[in-house]
């Protein structure tokens, strides 16, 4: 295979730093020395021929037997060349590693998460605090020696926290001297985790001057369930059920992202019919998720009626999904290698009926909001994030498209036969709340378009691959042939066993790029089950979007980036 | 003897007005939920009684029996007083609103207004702004930052819109030349409504906008703003104190509509003549229509932002209402009044 230009340039530029190169399933990985990480990243990001201007993800992996037991993995992406690239470096627990937050702003939160989960320290990071667990938490959950059973822990006592601790800024950020007017003018307001407009359990600490926001600090982790750790104890198939609970407004899309990652890891082809069913369901789910967003976003800005209109349509989508998958919120319907069951009879007509009515309903929302002067006043020029900033933050989905970047995984890396569908990628211009609103509205239209095509394309056929590595034998086979019976037992007792290797695979979720970085050690459980979630990166940019705005704009911006805490906290 | 009759008459009027008003407030909550329900493709209350008709009673009982909490760090006296101020001010407004023509009862002329004050309009503005103290104090005394912000917004909004509100009725004042509400209505008799006959239609709209801000309803519900301030000024209130704020809001809503009817829409005067004993029907109908409009727009508009409301009040409404005084003067000169 021909070497990527990035690899060649890197080897030419830093001959000593590159330790190893790995190629697996078409993905390039380069292992470099930890000391070189900052110059290498700077070079990759700034070199015009490479232009890795977009940081997708940073995560850690723990290999206890090794001397340098931790790996830090950087997933880079070049907008211009539509290329992915993976950097890895191995460090010991006590060895500090240079922060790349100066290269990509989005790295800040990822590094905090690595610090929190693995205990690695990053030098040059301006705000290295725990992010998903709380200050004073003991241990680092994603280390392999972290106990996973309750009996392995000591009894937990709630520490006596001073009552005012909840209304303080973190010490590293409070700087009353430099502010004009001094601390007397300011008020610290604790917004959330129980607040009607933070869309879940997001907690924001706001430093206010009157109603103007001088500083905003998000606190995460109120919904942290340790999904990445949990999945390491489950088989690959069991891992599907955890995905429903990430972005709980888009269960099927999450299923799809995970199944695609495992399929890539095992190199499995999915039958066409299953691919179309997946697309159809994922787009229906996207409409449902966007409807929920529109309703709550409008409600946050005081337009109460829109919520009920949206729920009317969402109800119909959920009914359709229920008829297909048997569940409304947590379908877990997709299987590795296909889908769990074929479509029920008559569902195509029902979907077509819904789509016909839906076009009219969308127009209804537009008349209520799009030209409404109050709506315009509340959303225009609020929470602006420029094109350049959006890339530097590594934003995802409608948020980055609202800033005018035509980037959609469905087009950039077509999966599940998306390249056979015609649809447009709507983009904004300003990157304000209104643009993101328009982008999502148009996305619903495009989704409807895709669903129509998918319904038309559906042909008779298998809905699950016959690959014996992932699909159990049919009941007929298992009942008549001994080798099939053995395979049946092995499948359900042991699960699937992918080969050693690591893949990153992502899909375009309603909220943006949802990706899985799976590391397999050749056993039946994932060695690392890293989830890159769009809400996490979008929330990281939240403080910079609301700085200098008013309190009322906070809810507008939060609504416009459409975060779901289930996937931020995982 | 005359004094005794006067006392009896006043007490009967007070009891009737108060009773009807409280009933109207209770059923306005139901009406709002029903109307909003119709707008929002849902039903509204249907469970308690036929068509949910006993819902307000159930709500009242529920509010009454809820635990009444006072935050530990609250300013207790003001915290308790705030909802009382609100409700007292809102109800007191009805003392000067004429709701019907003069009727004869056993040879005694009885005007359908509790207090026929010469400075009725002045009284209305004075008492209406008192009600805002309830909101400001309630938000401040609860020792809650959201409440405090709600209170601050209420204070700022009160000052901004009070001025425009008063200016918007200045045209009516110039035309009628009196502050007495009964006289203002009488001058409009026979269809000479201020809003149309005297070209006060735009001031009428300005009045409605300012009134919306005055009673803190969407799109001007800044002190409450449930999305960002999580209910704002009444965040720490529970039980009957909370209910009092709500009753005050609805009573105030009826009051501003009743005043609009009186000043701009001819009060109890109607398209065709009703006997004096039934003249209140016109008054109630017109007030009801305005109340409906207020509920309707709540189902339509998003909420404005605090600074936008301030800008709108000072830079848009204030100059326009000022200009209206000039325009009204011109009209009066042209008409030779």
Image (cartoon, rainbow, N blue to C red):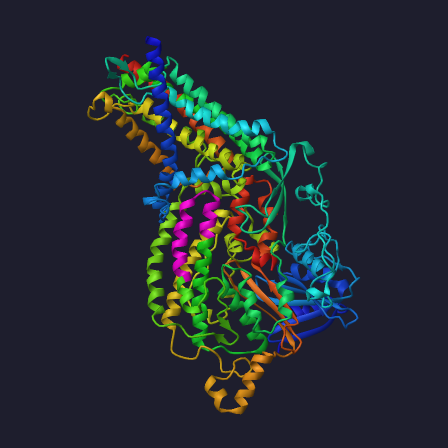
Q: Is residue B156 visible?
A: no
Residue B319 in the image: above or below residue B291: above
Tell me the quadrant of the picture where the C terminus of chain A can be found. Answer: bottom right
Tell me if residue B289 is in the magenta stretch.
Answer: no
Pick the residue in front: B141 or A454.
B141
Q: Main secondary structure of the magenta part?
A: helix
Residue A120 in the image: above or below residue A435: below
Residue occupying image coordinates x 56% and y 40%: A551
Tell me the quadrant of the picture where the N terminus of chain A can be found. Answer: bottom right
> Within the image, what quadrant is residue A341 found in?
bottom left
| Residue segment shown in magenta | A293-318
Residue occupying image coordinates x 66% and y 44%: A166
Pick the residue in front: A359 or A304.
A304
Residue A112 vs residue A68: left or right? Answer: left
Query: Total label count?
Result: 0
Hey, which residue is sitting farthest left in the picture?
Answer: B272
Residue A85: percent from the left, percent from the top?
A: 63, 67
Residue A249 in the image: above or below residue B222: below
Residue A109: percent from the left, percent from the top?
A: 66, 55
Q: Is residue B62 visible?
A: yes
> Within the image, what quadrant is residue A547 found in?
top right
Tell me if residue A311 is in the magenta stretch.
Answer: yes
């Amino acid at each position: 295979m021909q070497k990527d230009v990035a690899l060649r340039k890197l080897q030419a530029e830093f001959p000593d730093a590159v330790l190893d190169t790995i190629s697996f399933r078409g993905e390039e990985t380069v292992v470099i020395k930890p000391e070189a990480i900052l110059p290498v990243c700077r070079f990759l990001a700034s070199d015009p021929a490479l232009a890795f201007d977009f940081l997708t993800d940073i995560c850690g992996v723990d290999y206890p037997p090794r001397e340098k037991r931790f790996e830090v993995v950087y997933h880079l992406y070049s907008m211009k060349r539509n290329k992915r690239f993976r950097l890895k470096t191995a460090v010991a627990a006590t060895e500090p590693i240079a922060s790349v937050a100066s290269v990509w702003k989005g790295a800040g939160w990822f590094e905090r998460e690595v610090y929190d989960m693995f205990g690695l320290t990053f030098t040059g990071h301006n705000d290295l605090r725990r992010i998903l667990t709380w200050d004073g938490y003991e241990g680092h959950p994603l280390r392999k020696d972290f106990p996973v059973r309750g009996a392995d822990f000591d009894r937990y006592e709630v520490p006596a926290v001073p009552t005012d601790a909840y209304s303080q800024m973190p010490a590293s950020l409070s700087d009353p001297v430099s502010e004009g007017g001094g601390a007397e003018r300011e008020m610290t307001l604790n917004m959330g985790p129980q607040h009607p407009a933070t869309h879940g359990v997001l907690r924001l600490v706001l430093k206010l001057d009157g109603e103007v926001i001088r500083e905003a600090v998000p606190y995460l982790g109120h919904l942290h369930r340790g999904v990445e750790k949990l999945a390491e104890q489950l088989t690959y198939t069991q891992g599907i059920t955890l995905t429903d609970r990430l972005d709980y407004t888009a269960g099927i899309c999450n299923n799809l992202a995970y199944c695609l990652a495992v399929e890539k890891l095992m190199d499995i082809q999915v039958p066409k019919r299953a691919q179309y069913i997946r697309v159809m369901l994922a787009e229906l789910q996207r409409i449902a998720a966007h409807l929920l967003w529109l309703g709550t976003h409008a409600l946050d800005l005081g337009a109460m009626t829109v919520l009920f209109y949206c729920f009317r349509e969402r109800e119909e989508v959920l009914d359709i999904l229920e008829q297909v998958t048997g569940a409304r919120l947590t379908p877990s319907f997709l299987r590795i290698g296909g889908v769990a069951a074929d479509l029920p009879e008559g569902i195509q007509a029902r979907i077509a009926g819904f789509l016909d009515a839906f076009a009219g309903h969308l127009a209804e929302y537009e008349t209520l909001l799009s030209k409404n002067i109050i709506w315009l006043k509340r959303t225009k020029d609020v929470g602006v994030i420029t094109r350049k900033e959006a890339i530097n933050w590594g934003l995802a989905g409608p948020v980055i498209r609202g800033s005018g970047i035509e980037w959609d995984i469905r087009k950039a890396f077509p999966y599940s036969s998306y390249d056979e569908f015609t649809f447009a990628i709507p983009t904004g211009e300003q990157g304000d709340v209104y643009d993101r609103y328009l982008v999502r509205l148009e996305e619903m239209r495009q989704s409807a378009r895709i669903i129509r095509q998918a319904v038309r394309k559906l042909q008779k056929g298998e809905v699950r691959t016959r690959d014996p590595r992932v699909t159990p034998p049919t009941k007929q086979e298992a009942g008549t042939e001994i080798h099939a019976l053995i395979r049946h037992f092995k499948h359900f007792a042991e699960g699937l066993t992918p080969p050693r290797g690591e893949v990153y695979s992502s899909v375009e979720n309603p909220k943006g790029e949802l990706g899985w970085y799976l590391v397999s050690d050749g056993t039946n459980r994932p060695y690392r089950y890293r989830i890159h979630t769009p809400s996490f990166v979008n929330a990281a940019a939240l403080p910079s979007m609301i700085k200098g705005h008013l309190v009322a704009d906070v809810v507008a911006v939060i609504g416009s980036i459409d975060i779901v805490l289930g996937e931020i906290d995982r | 003897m005359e004094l005794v009759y006067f006392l009896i008459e006043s007490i009967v009027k007070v009891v009737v007005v108060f009773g009807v008003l409280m009933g109207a407030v209770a059923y306005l909550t139901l009406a709002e939920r029903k109307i909003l329900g119709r707008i929002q493709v849902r039903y509204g209350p249907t469970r308690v009684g036929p068509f949910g008709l006993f819902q307000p009673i159930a709500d009242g009982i529920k509010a009454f029996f809820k635990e009444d909490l006072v935050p530990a760090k609250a300013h207790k006296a003001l915290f308790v007083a705030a909802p009382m101020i609100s409700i007292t001010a809102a109800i007191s407004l009805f003392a000067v609103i004429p709701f019907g023509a003069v009727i004869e009862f056993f040879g005694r002329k009885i005007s359908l207004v509790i207090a026929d004050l010469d400075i009725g309009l002045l009284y209305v503005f004075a008492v209406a702004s008192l009600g805002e103290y309830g909101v400001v104090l309630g938000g401040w005394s609860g020792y809650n930052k959201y409440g405090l912000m709600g209170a601050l917004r209420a204070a700022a909004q009160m000052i901004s819109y009070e001025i425009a509100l008063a200016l918007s009725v200045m045209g009516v004042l110039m035309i009628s030349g009196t502050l007495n509400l009964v006289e203002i209505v009488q001058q409009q008799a026979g269809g000479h409504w201020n809003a149309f006959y005297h070209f006060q239609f735009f001031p009428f709209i300005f009045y409605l906008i300012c009134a919306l801000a005055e009673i803190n309803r969407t799109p001007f519900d800044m002190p409450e703003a449930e999305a960002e301030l999580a209910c704002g000024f009444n965040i720490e209130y529970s039980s009957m104190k909370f209910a009092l704020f709500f009753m005050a809001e609805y009573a105030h809503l009826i009051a501003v509509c009743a005043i609009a009817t009186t000043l701009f829409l001819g009060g109890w005067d109607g398209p065709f003549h009703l006997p004096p004993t039934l003249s209140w029907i016109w008054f109630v109908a017109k007030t009801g229509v305005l109340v409906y409009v207020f509920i309707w727009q709540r189902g339509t508009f998003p909420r404005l932002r605090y600074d936008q409301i301030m800008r709108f009040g000072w830079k848009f409404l204030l100059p326009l209402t000022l200009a209206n005084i000039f325009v009204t003067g011109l009209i009066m000169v042209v008409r030779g009044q």
